[in-house]
Image (cartoon, rainbow, N blue to C red):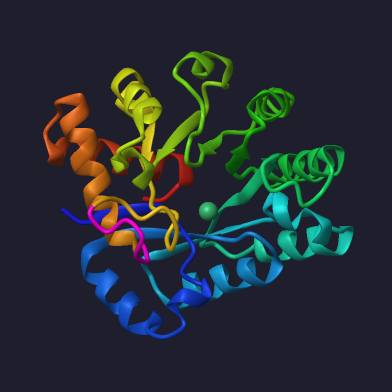
Amino acid sequence: MKLVDTHCHLDDERYDIDREELIKKLEEKMEFVVNIGFDLPSSIKSVEYSNSYDFIYAVIGFHPTSISEYSEEAENSLRELSKNKKVVAIGEIGLDYYWMEDEKEVQKVGFRKQMKLAEELNLPVVIHSREAMADTIEILKEFPKVKGIFHCYPGSFESLSEIPEGYYFGIGGVLTFKNSKKTVEFVKKVDISRIVIETDSPYLTPTPFRGKRNEPSYVQYVLEKISEIKNIPFEEVLRITTENAKKIYGID
Ligand SMILES: [Zn+2]
């Protein structure tokens, strides 16, 4: 059975030296990968890759650290891009109070506008939230029709009940880190029907490659760790999380 990566950034400059080679290699191992935009150029690139390769899908949107670039014109560009059939969600969008490139209020306005856009286009969302859990959840609740993926879920099992039911949790390389107690605890308790697997390549490389450039096929190590934590056979973890990913992204 082939692997799935629900979140990667193959447009990142760290792939400039061997991107085509890497994609060829991935094509053999991966059922599909989803390339995630964080501003307009990366969203356009995501769509370009999805047009060039059957197994690549695109997510388009403005990351909270790029939110100052979000304008009416930019929103219309996303609308235009979303007409492409391989665009499966709006993202990654949300709040980042760690980097704080823009004021909280500015981030919230941009987040709400993109949630509204997802609702209008009937697309799910990919959420990025860093040190902003309460405000993120508050905004998600304002859009009860919208579903999505909580990427690299940073919360505890306790805050899970606050998150609307239509959301899946993206689990990645962090789970394999030595200091990942919170994520391990979360994975132990959460129902596997709400987990999807991601790498966030080129970032968050799992053990045993931590520190090196990440790549989508390394979901293997995340799957192995979940299998171990939940005591579910690897193939079963892969099968269920693949189904979850297809369901939320509307991929058949
Ligand atoms: Zn990302």
**In the image, residue 187 above or below residue 111:** above
Residue 43 locus on image (x, y percent): 62, 66
Quarter assignment of residue 157? top left
Can I make out residue 10 in this image? yes
Nearer to the camera, 124 or 233: 233
Most common SS among magenta residues: loop
Return the x and y of residue 53 as percentages of the image width and height: 40, 74
Q: Residue at x 75, y 46 (%)?
A: 100
Query: So how many labels did they put on this image?
Result: 0
Q: Quadrant of residue 81?
A: bottom right
Residue 81 shown left or right of residue 69 in the figure: left
Question: Residue visible at 48% across and 34% down?
Answer: 153
Residue 105 in the figure: left or right of residue 189: right
> In the image, which residues are magenta?
208-214
Indicate the position of residue 32 as horizontal and vertical percent values: 34, 59
Residue 9 shown left or right of residue 124 in the figure: left
Please report the residue visible at 63 percent of the width from the left and 33 percent of the height from the top: 131
Which residue shows up at 33% across the image and 38% down it? 175
Q: Is residue 141 above or below residue 173?
A: above
Looking at the image, which is closer to me, 141 or 218? 218
Task: Identify which residue, 16 or 126, lies in the foreground.
Answer: 16
Q: Quadrant of residue 87?
A: bottom right
Query: x, y (%) of residue 36?
Result: 54, 58
Q: Magenta stretch: residue 252 in it?
A: no
Whether residue 172 is visible here, answered yes or no, is: no
